[in-house]
Amino acid sequence: MSANSVINFVDAVAVYNGYPALAGVTLSVTRNEIVLLQGPNGAGKSTLLRACAGLMPVIRGTANVLGYDLTVDRESVRERVGLLGHQNGLFGELTIAENVSFWSTVVGASTQERNAAMERMAIDGKLAGRRVSELSAGQKRRCALACLVVRRAELWLLDEPHAGLDAKGRDEIDRIVKEAAASGATIVVASHEIERAQQLATRTVSLVAGQVRDSQ
Amino acid sequence: MSMSVSRIARAVAAKDLRIELRSRVVSNQVLPFSGLVMIMFAFALDNDDVLQRVAGGLVWLATLFSLFILVQRTFAVETYDGALDSLRVAGVNPQGIFIGKSVALFVQLLVLESVLFIAAIVLYRVNVNGAGAVLLVTCVMCATAGLAFVGTLYGGLTAGARGRETLLPLLLLPVVAPVLICATRATESAFRSSGVTVGEGWPWVAVLAVFAAVFGLGGLLSFGSLIEE
Amino acid sequence: MTTEQLKLKGVGTPATRVYGLMALVALGWVLLGGLIFTPEDAVQGDAVRIMYVHVPTAWVAYLAFIVTGVASACWMIGKKHSLGFDRVAGASAEVGVVFMGMTLLSGSLWGRITWGTFWVWDPRLTTTAFMFVTYIGYLAVRGLGGTAQQRARRSSVIALLAVLEIPLVHFSVVMWRSLHQRATVLSPDGDIKMDGLMLFTLLFGVFGFSVLFAWLVSHRQRIMAMQDAQQTSALDVAVSERLNEARA
């Protein structure tokens, strides 16, 4: 397996409550790619992203991410992977600034990195002092992304990142993704926004019924 | 980029306490509830002498009832928007999370117990002075540390998935029984109830200290496994 | 244990048949000895015969507790995390809970007959009650779902925490009860003068119940292995159904 391989799944099976959400996924992603993951609801896109982050056990097949064998050890890979799931992982009673500050501290980012992330996601200034529970869905999403950005992960896994954002917000996401790829990260995006994501992505992978249908 | 356990712990504890200050769940919900429990004990027992004798036990019982609420609250904060999941995904050292949340729970419990002891002094007419006060403070510190560790540990297991919260009392009650037994005896010594001397309370505090040490260490080692899916 | 081996013969093996028979003989003797051949006690009369059930079941309850703890530790320490250890831990806990219940029941009845109370705060009985509730909690945690390895991980941690907790409970209760110095008998069997036959029957009972425990646990863990194998087969079916979904 080459040093360039970021994700290497061969016939990977992952179950959730006995149901094979991934029924045999074969997928290969190399460094610096931006991969769009598309497919109908229930195809297993979220499960695949969670499996890549080491959150879900892969019980059959091969699953290597960044050189770690996930069937043996799911935990060591997590430091190097960033996942933005359906939930934002924020604390409602804290302000944006406090949320991003907390995440920066626990992952060891510097103050400059934190401020830069907030600026890029356009949540600095007056907005930073508002409590997360009072924000709109789009603003919460941008805050969650800022918390992801400070982690400087090598592999980004984004589950419907555009959802709930206005056009400006979506453009911002695309810009962040491109910048991250330019600085060496690999990105996998699951999205229903096919036209926009296809402009962004270097490759598209279709997932149907827990398997990869085709990949262009 | 991995952070030291102490920095993570400080950030988590500060975060939890700040959330508590903003949402005021302890001061506005838990304290009135436990104050009411103390009053209802008086209704049920209806005998000033009996109340004075069992005051120590009643304070710790009221603490235990409120412990469940506090534990569920501290983890509801994490699971509400998937923050605990995000902490796991980010590879944040679970030991840091365990210590941080235990410290925050410790502080909240201390606030609760202070109010309960004041209520006991007022409602049940016990009093404490000199050597008894020293015993009482030490007892409270050790018992609260034990409760905070155990609450965080089992709270982590029962957080999240639906239907799991109901498991918390079943798992937690047998484990906190030694704390109830020892803390009550030590408190009775501190209050000099029924002619017990202060000196007799110290062996009980020793057991409380052992309990806290055992579950502090046990928790450090196991918390990561219990919050894992 | 492969699926093929399990399919063939049910859960017994020649070895289990041997010690199953041993358990039957031993318990048969205890039944006869306990009810007929041994003398009644000078103080308690015929009530002492409950001892032949109560003491061995208490012993087995503690044995089950130890076996679950050791098996959980073995699962955790082994590099392969062999699921066999986890199954033994679970089987031992299930059988153990039954024996703990029997201990509490027999102890309660014995107390009722000898002193007129259904419960005494005897350290051994109280600790057994705590063990009972703790293991019910352990079994509830085993039922939380997920893959077999996920279940094994959670359960082994809970079992090892229980190993830390139970001695603390016991010690606290012993200290507590020593405050209430009802000098003479803290437990029904404290005061019994045992003659040779009584002692022999008692020890034989401990032996017999232990062998019964081993027999029950080995059968139960084999059933668990079959259940796990069946789950795997069901998963195979589910996976191929899902694969066909895509082709449709």
Image (tube, rainbow, N blue to C red):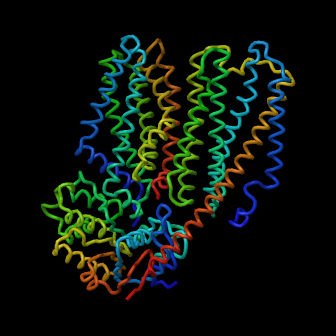
Q: Nearer the viewer, residue B195 or C209?
A: C209
Q: Say how many tags the image has.
A: 0
Taking C207 as reference, is A166 left or right? left
Question: Which image quarter is the N terminus of chain B in?
Answer: bottom left
Where residue A88 appears, x then y in whole percent? 29, 62
Where residue C2 appears, x then y in whole percent? 70, 66
Give the residue displayed 46% in from the left and 43% down from the top.
Answer: B167
Give the residue displayed 21% in from the left and 63% down from the top.
Answer: A137
Q: Is residue C6 above or below residue A69?
A: above
Q: Is residue C102 above or below residue C195?
A: below
Q: Nearer the viewer, residue A10 or A122?
A: A10
Q: Is residue C25 above or below residue C180?
A: below
Q: Residue furthest left?
A: A126
Q: Residue furthest front?
A: C248
Where residue B221 appears, x then y in whole percent? 51, 51
Where residue B151 appears, x then y in whole percent? 43, 42
Q: Nearer the viewer, residue A71 or C19?
A: C19
Give the residue displayed 30% in from the left and 27% down from the top.
Answer: B35
Quadrant of residue A98 within the rendered picture: bottom left
Q: Is residue B148 visible?
A: yes
Q: Nearer the viewer, residue B114 or B28?
A: B28
Taking B187 as reference, is A165 left or right? left
Q: Is residue C200 above or below residue A130?
A: above
Q: Is residue A74 visible?
A: no
Give the residue displayed 51% in from the left and 70% down from the top.
Answer: A70
